[in-house]
Image (spheres, rainbow, N blue to C red):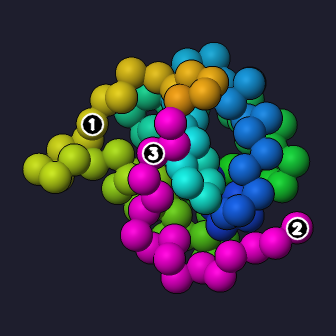
Amino acid sequence: MALVIGNQCIDVKDGICTTSCPVDCIYEGERMFYIHPGECIECGMCESICPVDAIRYDDELDPENAIFADINREVFRGADGELEEPGGWYANAPPIRDHPRLAEYAKRTN
């Protein structure tokens, strides 16, 4: 099982999840956060603190968010298809490029 961030995070990016992650495996993207599947230790701290209820274990995703299991994995794949190991997120790190599928989601305004 892996933890996954779903569509509730798009254009919200509260970021409190990054403060609870003991291994810094949650990376900021341009429109949402992503959990690196190889770095995550599946402790569930981020799930319990997410204010928009966007984080779930992949086997608990509702049908609307099932695609986000792939999106959270694929955003960390390099051009060769291999999983890249960025080495941990840190505050003020430049955002990673969003997965192309996010373009399908309308921009949210608060």
- Residue at 44% x, 28% y is 39
Question: Mark 2 — residue?
Answer: 110
Question: Mark 1 — residue?
Answer: 84
- Residue at 27% x, 36% y is 84
- Residue at 67% x, 63% y is 10
Q: 50 left or right of 2?
A: right
How crowded pointer 3 is (Cα within 10 Å; few <14, some 14-19, many 20+) is rated as some
Q: Quadrant of residue 21?
A: top right
Secondary structure at badge 2 equals: loop
Image quadrant in which the C terminus is located: bottom right
Secondary structure at badge 1 equals: loop
Q: Give the extent of the magenta segment.
A: 94-110
Q: Is residue 23 above or below residue 6?
A: above
Is residue 102 shown in magenta?
yes
Query: Can see residue 3?
Result: no
Question: Mark 3 — residue?
Answer: 96
Amino acid identity at mark 2: Asn
Query: Can see residue 86?
Result: yes
